[in-house]
Image (cartoon, rainbow, N blue to C red):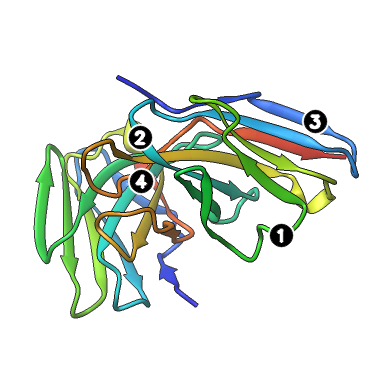
Amino acid sequence: QKEVEQNSGPLSVPEGAIASLNCTYSDRGSQSFFWYRQYSGKSPELIMSIYSNGDKEDGRFTAQLNKASQYVSLLIRDSQPSDSATYLCAVTEEVVGNTPLVFGKGTRLSVIA
Amino acid sequence: EPEVTQTPSHQVTQMGQEVILRCVPISNHLYFYWYRQILGQKVEFLVSFYNNEISEKSEIFDDQFSVERPDGSNFTLKIRSTKLEDSAMYFCASSRLVGGGTDTQYFGPGTRLTVL
């Protein structure tokens, strides 16, 4: 059974701070890693994808991957109240293809103004 | 920017009735998916579809479920005899550009199914 684990939160950070979201996965064969943001009652929206070990930065977001530790994280710098949402970690077995996404339960982030 | 669309946004049905959820994937994508999310729970994979056939399905996707691509744009999920536990948000997703690309899946806005 492939599992993706996330702390459900809520994670509360003040506006302007760095929010750190963590995720571990059980399937060592996982190749692709994604962070989705989901507002209440809405669909998952892709924030970042990462495929190789190390850091990947996109604006205020940085994804970090450590395949040896089976760990992926998302840092949000200069957090804004509009970042308040549930952040879903998802993994797949392949880089190219149509393998299903395996999602974690998500971490609820609350940015306090 | 192209996006996945889904109709209806909310469907209410009686237990035992058939429902069809509709999706229009991004036009130059090759792979299509259905996921569901029961309220307060995680997003779960139901089925993937490629080249007019099912590629993979989960344990959830039993005989009461079926998928179809009836024309060049629509992708449908049919639930033949709905149960109370089928109440959930159903998300359609698509991925993989014609000619190449990675496995990034883009989600539609979802259909909220309520079974009474």
Task: Between residue A111 and residue A60, name the one nearer to us.
Answer: A60
Q: Is residue B58 above or below residue B112?
A: below
**Tags 4 and 2 touching, CB below 8 Å:** no
Q: Chain of mark 2?
A: B
Q: Chain of mark 4?
A: A
- Residue type at tag 2: His
Residue carrying label 4: A36
Residue B81 image offset from top left, x and y in percent: 85, 46
Residue B79 image offset from top left, x and y in percent: 75, 44
Relative side of A46 to B44, left or right = left
Residue carrying label 2: B29
**Tags 4 and 3 touching, CB below 8 Å:** no
Q: Is residue B75 above or below residue B104?
A: above
Please tell me which of labels 1 and 3 falls first in the chain. Answer: 3
Q: Chain of mark 3?
A: B
Quote the CA–CA distance across marks 3 and 2: 30 Å
Q: Nearer the viewer, mark 1 or mark 4?
A: 1
- Residue type at tag 4: Tyr
- Residue B41, by quadrant, is bottom right
For numbered disc 3, what is the local secondary structure?
A: strand
